[in-house]
């Protein structure tokens, strides 16, 4: 079974579900509350890819895994971050706005960053990036489903709410199903690389969350905003990274997707622990 035929519908579903939860006003939060939005976007779009590159180099990741490692760091926040923000008693409106804004912005930043990373690391493993095809895939799989979701919510608000309630419940199991299928098909490579990649991913997530907390304190954000920024910077869209890595139009390489699979696992373990600590306090 080619995992691309699983990941593409799942990513489209996740983006459509995100659109159902959005309003045009969500994109305007930057005007009314610029500091938390700026903190989240800097953490996700600037700090996280830099951290991934430095960690990957420091821990000696193989070039093929380094490309996938930076790829997951370049991706936008995952739609599940909104649920985690709610559980952590964070600012859900801020979480939704950051997920929406990062999903749009990274359609441009991911091709730019990954072109540089692929040129720097890909020559050793004969990996090349068709930037134009990646950009078009992002438009089809991310922008269009989000736009359709927003349009459905605007025209049929009640139906959109019902669809959102259903899709939000199956989004996380769908991602776990994707990770399971991918693991079964690539279990030898994943098991062999789990020690180094598991450490790299864990360090990345913890430093990302720490960076989010630091940015929040520097910008004097509230406790609710800080918890949301920590979650948003630490939680990326693994489905998008897997789609880019395994797509026949882009990398067409399952090995590049392995860091995203391990990230999906470690991300949920670490953030569930974080939420549990917050709730206990």
Image (spheres, rainbow, N blue to C red):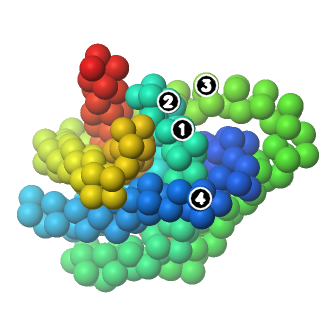
Q: Depth-wise, is mark 2 or mark 3 nearer the camera?
A: 2
Dot 4 falls on a residue whose secondary structure is helix
Question: Residue at (59%, 59%) from the top-left corner?
Answer: 32
Return the residue at label 4. 32
Return the residue at label 3. 169
Instruction: Indicate left or right for 188 with 138 as reference.
Output: left
Q: Depth-wise, is mark 4 or mark 1 nearer the camera?
A: 4
Dot 2 falls on a residue whose secondary structure is helix
Q: Could you say where residue 176 lies in the image, as x and y percent from the top left? A: 46, 31
Dot 3 falls on a residue whose secondary structure is helix
Q: Are marks 2 and 4 in contact (CB under 8 Å)?
A: no
Question: Residue at (36%, 38%) from the top-left corner?
Answer: 223
Q: CA distance from mark 4 to mark 1?
A: 16 Å
Q: Are marks 2 and 1 in contact (CB under 8 Å)?
A: yes
Q: Could you say where residue 33 lies in the image, as x and y percent from the top left? A: 53, 57
Label 2 CA crowd tier, 10 Å (few <14, some 14–19, many 20+)? some
Q: Are marks 4 and 3 in contact (CB under 8 Å)?
A: no
Q: Are marks 4 and 1 in contact (CB under 8 Å)?
A: no
Q: Quadrant of the C terminus?
A: top left
Question: Would you identify the image quadrant in which residue 20 lies?
Answer: top right
Q: CA distance from mark 2 to mark 1?
A: 6 Å
Return the residue at label 1. 92
The tag earlier along the polypeptide, 3 or 1, is: 1
Above or below 130: residue 71? above
Q: CA distance from mark 2 to mark 4?
A: 21 Å
The tag earlier along the polypeptide, 4 or 1, is: 4
Q: CA distance from mark 3 to mark 1?
A: 17 Å
Q: Nearer the viewer, residue 22 or 31?
A: 31
């Amino acid at each position: 079974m080619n995992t691309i035929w699983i990941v593409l519908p799942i990513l489209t579903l996740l983006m459509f579900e995100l659109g159902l939860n959005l309003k045009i006003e969500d994109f305007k939060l930057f005007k009314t509350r610029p500091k938390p939005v700026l903190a989240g976007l800097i953490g996700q779009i600037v700090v996280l890819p830099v951290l991934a590159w430095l960690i990957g180099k420091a821990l000696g990741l193989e070039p093929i895994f380094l490309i996938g490692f930076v790829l997951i760091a370049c991706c936008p926040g995952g739609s599940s971050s909104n649920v985690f923000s709610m559980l952590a008693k964070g600012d859900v409106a801020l979480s939704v706005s950051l997920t929406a804004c990062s999903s749009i912005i990274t359609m441009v930043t991911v091709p730019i960053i990954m072109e540089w990373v692929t040129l720097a690391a890909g020559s050793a493993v004969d990996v090349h990036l068709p930037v134009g095809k990646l950009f078009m895939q992002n438009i089809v799989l991310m922008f269009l489903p989000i736009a359709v979701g927003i349009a459905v919510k605007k025209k049929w608000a009640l139906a959109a709410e019902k669809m959102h309630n259903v899709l939000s419940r199956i989004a996380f199991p769908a991602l776990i199903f994707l990770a399971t299928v991918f693991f079964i098909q690539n279990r030898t490579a994943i098991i062999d690389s789990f020690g180094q990649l598991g450490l790299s991913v864990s360090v990345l997530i913890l430093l990302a969350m720490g960076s989010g907390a630091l940015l929040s304190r520097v910008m004097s954000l509230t406790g609710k905003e800080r918890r949301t920024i920590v979650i948003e910077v630490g939680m990326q869209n693994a489905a998008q990274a897997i789609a880019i890595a395994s797509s026949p139009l882009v990398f067409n390489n399952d090995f590049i997707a392995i860091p995203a699979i391990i990230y999906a696992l470690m991300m949920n373990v670490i953030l569930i622990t974080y939420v549990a600590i917050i709730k206990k306090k």
